[in-house]
Structures are given as C-alpha cells and as structure tokens.
Amino acid sequence: MRLFIAINFPSDIKAAIAKVRDKIKNAALRGSFSLDENLHLTLVFIGECDRLQTEEIKEVMDSITFSPFMLKLNKAGYFNCGGGDVWWVGLKESAPLLLLQSELEAKLRQSGLVLESRRFAPHITLGREVKVPAGFIAPKTVQAKFSVVSIELMKSEHINGKLTYTQIYSKGN
C-alpha cells in the first residue's frame, strides 16, 4: 500500500481551495489537476508499506498528542519544475503544525521507516505539470481558517484510472 499521513479539510475549506484551483485550471494550457475529494495537506509521505509497517504507523500516530489548532489558507503559488509547474495553496505559518509534523516524522523514522529527506513546506497541491500563459498572475486565495482536530493515515491508489485517496485510520483528540 502507498501511504501518507495528512490533514483533511472540511467541505467549506475544500470549496475555497477548489475555486483557486479552477481559476488556474481554466487559464492553463495544460496540467493535471487535483480532484476536490483529493485536496489535503500531506504531513508525511511514507510510500509503499506492508501490513506490519501500517500497524507501526498507526501506533506512532496513537503516540502523538496535540491540542486542536487553527490553520489559515494563504496565497497560491507554484514550484518551478522543468516540464510544467506544481501549483499550490499555502498556509499561514503555524508553530503547532510544524511541531506536529516534526514529531510525526521523527517517531516514524525511530520506528524504522525510511522517509524522504525533503524539508517540510506546508502546501495543498492544486495541479502538477501545469503550464500557464506568460504573464499569468496567481489568483487570490480566500483567507479561510479551520480547526485541525485529527490527522489521517491515507492510502493512495489508482482505481479505474482515477487517483483515489482513502482514509484507513484517523487519530483525533
């Protein structure tokens, strides 16, 4: 199973993010855009795991304690990539988010999982391999905020040619 730990959003936040995505998508010359139901914030990408590793991940999640905290959507932007850019919506800086992410990552590494070594840059992916016309200006993002009360273990798979994320475990407070 291909796994990651994420924060999923309430429907109103997904709708606000989708509006930004749609403005980029409508202007784009090409790109692969995230489906509404797949919009999330990845805390830790884990990758391929067997059943034993999946149980270890759940134990790590259960060992994490955090109080509910607020996150606020920020501006849209993109990561420069050769064949097309990755467009995203960012989040306002959040100490509780960074603490939660670093604790998760550290405990997963201690359990023996091999994780990517990229620095955590909190963002919600809107589209990959996106090419927009010259002079395109990123749309404004609604400065919506929401409370984080749980984290989810998600499975990523292609079902009938469609990328599908399925929650397989949740850790709330």
Image: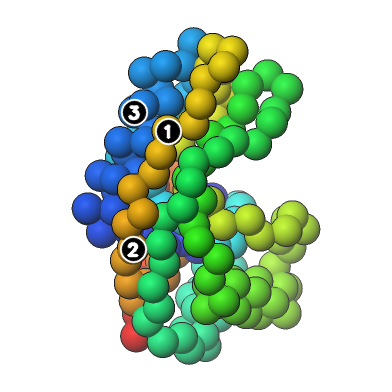
Name the residue at 53% across, 34% down.
87
> For mark 3, does the 10 Å Cα neighbourhood hold few (<14), some (14 to 19), or many (20 or more) residues?
some
Kind of residue at disc 2:
Lys
Q: Secondary structure at mark 1?
A: loop
> For mark 2, does the 10 Å Cα neighbourhood hold few (<14), some (14 to 19), or many (20 or more) residues?
some
Left or right of 20? Residue 100 is right
How many marks overall?
3
In space, the residues marked 2 and 1 are separated at their CA atoms by 18 Å
Q: Which residue is mark 1?
A: 139
Answer yes or no: do the residues labelled 1 and 3 have beta carbons within 8 Å?
A: no
What is the quadrant of residue 140 in the picture?
top left
In space, the residues marked 3 and 2 are separated at their CA atoms by 20 Å
Q: Measured from the top left, where is residue 55 in percent x and y?
A: 51, 74
Q: Earlier in the sequence, mark 1 or mark 3?
A: 3
Q: Which residue is mark 2?
A: 145
Closest to the observer, 46 or 104? 104
Question: Depth-wise, is mark 3 or mark 2 nearer the camera?
Answer: 2
Q: Secondary structure at mark 2?
A: strand
Q: Earlier in the sequence, mark 2 or mark 1?
A: 1
Q: Measured from the top left, where is residue 26 in percent x and y?
A: 36, 18
Q: Earlier in the sequence, mark 3 or mark 2?
A: 3
Q: Is residue 171 visible?
A: no
Q: Measured from the top left, where is residue 60 in percent x and y?
A: 55, 80
What is the quadrant of residue 116 in the picture?
bottom right
Q: Which mark is residue 22?
A: 3
Kind of residue at disc 1:
Pro
